Structure formats: C-alpha cells, structure tokens
Image: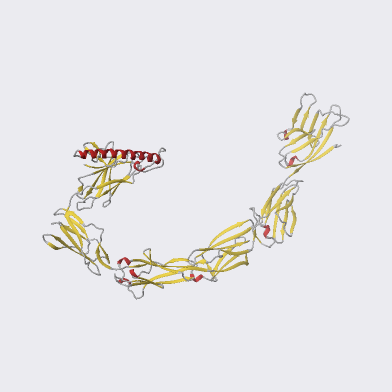
Amino acid sequence: MKDNVIHIDAVLGDKAELPCHVQTTNSTTESPILIIWYRGQDYPIYSIDQREHTTSQHWSGLSMKERIYYTENKGYAVLIIEDIRTSDGGQYRCREDFKYSPTRNNFILLDIIVPPSRLEILDNEKNVVWNSTLPPVMENEPLEITCKAYDGNPLPRLTWNIRGENNLDSTIYGIEIDDNTVANVLRIDHVHRENLGRKLICEASNMKNTIQISTSVTMNVYLKPLSVSITGAEHPFLSGEPSNLDCISYGSRPAANITWYHNGRVIEYETKRIKVVGNNNMTWSTLKLVPSDDDNQSVISCVASNIYFPADSKEQQIILNVHYPPRLKICLGRNLNVSNIKEGSDVYFECTINASPSITRLDWDHNGSNVGQHESRRTIVSNQTLVLQSITRKGSGSYRCIASNARGKSISDAYNLDVKYEPSCKTDQQRVYGAHKGETAWVKCDVNSNPIPTSFRWAFNNSVSGLMNVANSDKSMATIKFKVLDFGTLLCWATNSLATQSQPCVYHIVPAGRPDPPRNCLPVNVTSTRFAIRCEPGYGGGLPQHFACTLATIDRPDVVEASYVGQTGHMVVKITGLRPSTRYVATVYASNAKGSSVGQVRVYVETAPNPKDPRVAGDSTSTATRFSEAAHIGMLLLGCCFVGVCAMAVVYAKRLAANVRGRSVFRERQTVRIQNGEEIRFTGSKGVDERPVVTS
C-alpha cells in the first residue's frame, strides 16, 4: 500500500530533490534508525544506518555514486541527484525503519523535463532571422513573423511578449504543432510609425511559471517623409558672397533624398548631413551658394523623397532676395592711348557703376591715398569722372574708384597708370669713387627713367685736359669700367625712347685711402644681453665704408671676446650674446676696401641685470636708465643740488680773489684714468653713468 506519493519534476541536466517524509505523530516521537532509497521497488541506491553506531553510516550504490548525496531540510530527509539524465526518470521509494514503530514507505514519481533545444524567428518569406533586426517592412503594410521551438518533452508553450508603449493593432496569434516542433505565428495588419524599434520577444517553456528559452527581434519600419522646410532665407542675400540654405526633412526612413532646384533646374553642388533623433529620422542638407546680381527674385526649391514611397515626396520653394553693394569698373578715357602717357599730358578716368540701391558716395584713390578735387593740383572730380591735368611722374601708380550704398562699400580693381618721363639722376647713389692712379673703378650711372635707358654716354673732366668723351664698349650698360689715369669728374647722360637727359650725373674720382675713424659713438638700446653702438661717419676715403668693433670686458680690456661688423652704409653696429650686469669696452673703427681707419673709438657700456633675477623688478634696461626707488633718489639729488650751490659760491669767491691778484684759478676738470698707458677721459662723473670716448 503506498502511503505517500510525491510528484517531482526535474529539468534535464539540473538536479532533483527526493524528499523522505520523516514526520512525527501524536503517538510517537521516534526517529528512524534506517532510511533506504530504492529506485523502482527493490533496487537500493542510498541508505543511512543508525542502528548500531554512534554516528550515521551512509552508503550509495555504484550506479549513481558520483551524483547523489544526502541532506536534511526542514525536518525532511532529502536525497539529491545531480546532473539529471533522461534515464533517471521513474518511481522511487524511501523506506523508514523505526526501533519500535512500524516501517513507513514514501513513494516518489520523478518526471524528467527536456527543455526545447532552440528557438527560431522566421520573417514573411519564412526565412530565418539570424540577427536581431527584422527585414524592413513598409509603413501601413502587414507584417507576419513566426516563432518556432524545436524538441522538448513535453512540447513547450510559445508566447509572444511585445514591448513598447502602445499596443499593436489587429494582432493575431496562431499556434501550429508538428511532431517535435511548436510554432506561434504573429500577424499585424497595419504596421505604424510608432512600431519602429519595438522589440518582439518569443518565449518558450514546458514548466509552470518558468521561461526556459527566449529570443527577440526588433521591428524595422521604412517610413514616408513627413515634412520639408528651408531655413536661412530670412534675410536678404549679398551678391558674390557665399551663403548657406538648409533643407530639413523629418520622418523619412531610410534618410530622405534631398534635391535642390534653381528655377526648375537641378543644382548638383550640395552637402548632405544626416541626423537621427529618436524614431523620427531627420535629414539635413546644406546648399552652399554664391548668388549673383542676376539671381535676384529667382526660385530655389527643395524636394525630400524616399525611393520606397515615390508618391509621397515633400517640396518647399523660396524666392531669393539678393542685395548687392556697388559693382565698379575703372577704365581710362576712351580717347587716350595708354601706351603714350607722358609727363605734361591730360588724363581722365571713368568709373562704371552698377549698384542696388544707388550709391551715396564716390571717391577716388591713388596708391592708397584719397584723390580729391584740387584746382592748384589740377585735379577735377565730376560725376563719375576723374580728370588729371598736366600729369607728372608722381601720377604713376594704381587708381581705384570707391563707392558706397546701403549694402556696403566697394573698391574697384586697380588700374595701373604708367607715366613716361626722360632720364634724371637718382639722389641716393654713390657720388665719390676713390682709386689710385692706374686702378680700375666701376662707376654706375644710376638714373630714374621710364622707359629704361637704351644707352649711356660718358665724359671725363679735369683741370688739365678739360672735357673728354670716354669710350664705352657696351653703351646699353649703366656701369662703366673706368681706368683712373687722373683725378677729376665723370659725367653721364642716359637716353631712353623719349629723350636724353638734359643734366648729366656727376661722379668725382678722387685718390682712394683708408677711412677716417667714426665720431660721436654712443651706446643705444642697452639690455641685459645686447646693445648697439651708433656713430657719425668720417670721411670714407672715397669708397663705401662700414663700422666694426671688437669687444672686451673692463677687467680684461686686452682680451678680445668677440668681433662685430656692421652693414655697409649703416651707422650702427649691433652687439649680442652678452652677460647681464657686466661692464664692457667696445673698440669701434671704420673700414673700406683699402683697409681700416687708423684711429679708433672706445665706448664703455654696462649691461642691465638679468630680468629673471628675483632681485630685479622686471627691468631689462641699462643701470644708467633705471630709476627704482625714485623718491629716495629725488631726495638725494635735492641735497646734492644744495651742496653744489654752496660749492659754486665758494669757487666764485675764490675766483674773484684770484682776479684781484691778477690770475684765475677756476678751470674745468675732467675725470682722467690711466690704463695700460692709455688716457681715458670720462664725460660724466665716476659711476654707472660714465660713457667715455677714448682716442688712442
């Protein structure tokens, strides 16, 4: 007789718990001394023996020894079977023996549940959906998908779990069973825009309150364009200036194709940018255009289309409102020959203007300067014409007309006027050439001429022979190779296509020699690492000269640390790479092709402190020019002035007394130092402001 029968379900590969009802009754509180689990009726698999031992003795059969063990749970003796197999299913019996009470048998029926092996989702064409997204379905068209489960014992139950904010319309479910498969068909009559991105989940289970396996797909819906709009045309366009128009279309999926039209013709040049916001697809296309004057009141259209919905395109049109500043063109008067404008000619320019609205101001520009009406300069401005009477060579250069209207100011392209004139001597050229008799001097006849000279004539003049022509092997060259046989002057006449210059250029041929030493040399721009020496040049010996110097420190004046050479024709020598707070002596001399000057000038300079030194308040100039703590210095100077006045009074009194005796004792004194046999005279008092000029 079966006292108790318990039905236990276990999933294949999981574990099963086989309880044995160890229960007490009102008549006895006796615990079992022997518990035996049988598979079937008489095949023991596990036992717990407490009959003759102080501790329980456990035994397990060989067939399941590695997979079973015993535990107690809330008063029940439980036999655990792990890694459940299909062969483990069937009837089990638990026998409990007591010392005084009768034996009790508990019967257990173990059912093995085999879950489905896999799930598949099939699309409208009964093709398996291998990724997580369904093939696209058109908006408002039907959708049918199938979920199929394979294997399972018992056969699983399939359900569709549809996640989303809104319910699907006209949803139909259908169950199909065939041998070892179960299928559930989901049908939707009309797929709406809101269904885009919605997840459809298929769940399978052959156990109560348990989902054993599931799979899902996401709905992929192609959508029609909802709207199209053009932005960026709120203000007038400026002709010739780049502008952007944006065409934005919402709702299309895939992204809408944006096509631009100008007066009905397709515009090929455009850039497309696509943005997606949530489930509402936005397509954004930017048209880059440079409108011209003729584009005013023309029509721009934007069309948004989807190839899957050819009948549902959206279009918007705008009318271009183009404003433009004056368009200017400058030209020479129609009766003038541009290739034959000479000094003394009358010239006029005309400015052609196309502007909307009309101009409010017109100006003329010559080489960056405004040209206004001025009778004394014979300049006349009338309407859109500029008249230049009796033009000179200064009238050469670029001319522009400048006009303004409400949209802005415009400047025309430059018209370059070339005024022709006969040759004349340049003022900034070498006039004196030094050489010894028998030497050759290269003399250049440097003239202003337009067009350039075609020939040069040379003559030599001295007090003995008078004016004589000089042979020139290449008359087209401005430079002559002149052999000095005597000293005097060379004369040069240049000739261009207009005329020969009336006044010749004069060049003096003098005996060449070394230059005189420079004069009045002073340091300038003194910093912590550099300074410059500016001098006045002496006679250059008839040749181009330049200044140079050597540098040493005051402590070691005979040890030259560096040498510096200035540029020919420049009055400054730059000295760099110095040390801060160091006193230097610079020996300055002049040089030309014949050698260096005999005399030299020494300049004493102290560099400024290092500006990065925390003890220096950011001053990078010479100590002679720093005025830190000006208040204290001012008080000190005031005291010095008072002492000086007193001293002068005393000296003046002594001078009067000396005059009475017939002699004067007042004379100017200078600070004198003797160093290495050289006399150094400082122009100031002893201190950091000493700037001596020393001659050897």
176 on left or right of 679? right
Q: Looking at the picture, how far across and down is residue 229, in whole percent? A: 60, 64
- Residue 192 x, y percent position in the rendering: 69, 60
User: Please, which residue is most extreme toward the front here?
Assistant: 660
Hey, which residue is sitting farthest bottom in the picture?
335
Res 634 visible: yes
In-image side of 327 versus 155 (left or right): left
Colour approach in the figure: secondary structure
Tell me where residue 616 sits by quadrant. top left
* Residue 307 visible here: no
The residue under the point 24% across, 58% down is 429
Front one among 664 and 339: 664
Q: Quadrant of the C terminus?
A: top left
Instruction: Report the quarter where the N terminus lies.
Output: top right
Frontmost residue, 469 versus 693: 693
Q: Is residue 509 above or below residue 647?
A: below
Q: Which quadrant would residue 411 be assigned to in this image?
A: bottom left
Q: Residue furthest right?
A: 27
Q: Is residue 464 above or below residue 65?
A: below
**Total numbered labels placed on residues in the image:** 0
Using the rendered view, name the quadrant where residue 139 is placed. bottom right
* 417 sits to left or right of 426: right
Q: What is the x, y in percent for residue 134?
A: 65, 56
Q: Position of residue 140 (x, y in %)?
A: 68, 63
Q: Nearer the viewer, residue 687 or 180?
A: 687
- Residue 106 lies, with reference to residue 316, above or below; the image says above
Q: Residue at x 37, y 69 (%)?
A: 373
